[in-house]
Amino acid sequence: MLNEARKRLIFALDVDSFDKAQAWVELLREQVGLFKVGKQLFTRCGPQVVEMIRELGSDVFLDLKYHDIPNTVAKAGVEACRLGVGMFNVHALGGLEMMQQTVAEVDAWCRDAGQTRPLMLAVTILTSSTEETLRGVGIDRPVTEMVPKLAKLARDAGFDGVVASPQEVGLIREVCGDGFAIVTPGVRPAFASLDDQKRVTTPATAIAAGASHLVIGRPISAAVDPVEAARLILGEIADALNR
Ligand code: C5P
């Protein structure tokens, strides 16, 4: 069960140098299934950082959230496949055609290369966005309506899952069914919550609600003993999977 839990734990490599990224991968690769490389690290270090993680035997979630004209996103998706990442993402707000063309070109490239297709994820609404943010860009709909709508659009385009806040997992499961990946950041393990009264989504709650993967950064990186923190999180995930 711990191995099953490990596949679901994604560590956010939110650092600004190749050496720091490498040190985290070497430290945590036994506990963590995938390492998330986002815009900061990728802009600083480029594809070499992805290659380093793969050479150390770990898998990569390339979190670059592509959003552009369909042709550009499709070609970027193919390059993510060429790098051998296990997961990459786009913004569902880029629309159905953008996502469909990306699926088509990625599928064709992976078939020709004899490579397994990476898990293709769509960001619905960023967890930092509120209804006010949406109104500011002319979207006069509640977040709770936009999130399942965009998740369904991604599924209809042939995507494998979405990135969403733990609070939205139930809504997404309802419209997208089982087997659709739901990757949730913003999770705080039970041990990291200083105040029992504070409402936090723990790994166990997120998994029980239907999350398939958890993105966790600071609760591990800022812990006094990061390996122990990752182990405790794996235990929480494994317990939730056993229930
Ligand atoms: O907060 P933490 O360090 O665990 O964040 C890990 C990753 O998840 C970060 O890369 C951050 O951008 C993302 N995140 C998010 N939504 C949140 C909290 C964190 O997308 N509410």
Image (cartoon, grey):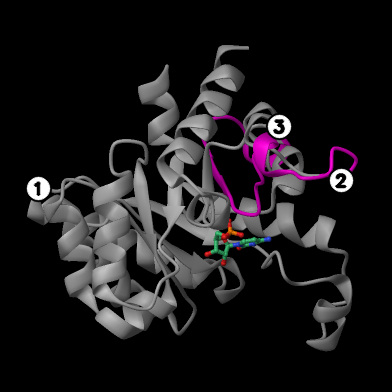
Main secondary structure along the magenta-highlighted residues: loop
Residue depicted at x 69% and y 66%: 125
Q: Which residue range is magenta in the image?
A: 174-199
Q: Position of residue 141 (x, y in %)?
A: 87, 69
Q: Secondary structure at mark 1?
A: loop
Neighbor class of circle 2 (other Cα within 10 Å; few <14, some 14-19, many 20+) is: few
Q: Is residue 127 above or below residue 18?
A: above
Q: Position of residue 82 (x, y in %)?
A: 16, 64
Residue 83 visible in this rendered orientation of the protein: no
* Residue depth check, mark 1 versus mark 2: number of the one nearer the observer: 2
**Amino acid residing under circle 1:** Gly
Residue annotated with mark 2: 198
Residue depicted at x 42% and y 79%: 40
Residue 166 visible in this rendered orientation of the protein: yes
User: Label 2, label 3: how many angstroms apart (C-alpha)?
Assistant: 14 Å
Position of 150 with respect to 171 (left or right) is left
**Mark 2: is the Cβ under 8 angstroms from ligand 1?**
no
- Decide which of tag 2 and tag 3 comes sooner along the chain: 2
Residue annotated with mark 1: 114
Whether 17 is among the magenta residues is no
* Residue depth check, mark 2 versus mark 3: number of the one nearer the observer: 2
Residue annotated with mark 3: 205
Q: Give the quadrant of residue 104.
A: bottom left
Q: Secondary structure at mark 2?
A: loop
**Mark 3: is the Cβ under 8 angstroms from ligand 1?**
no
Q: Secondary structure at mark 3?
A: helix
- Circles 3 and 1: CB atoms closer than 8 Å: no
Whether 197 is among the magenta residues is yes
Neighbor class of circle 3 (other Cα within 10 Å; few <14, some 14-19, many 20+) is: many
Quadrant, the N terminus: top left
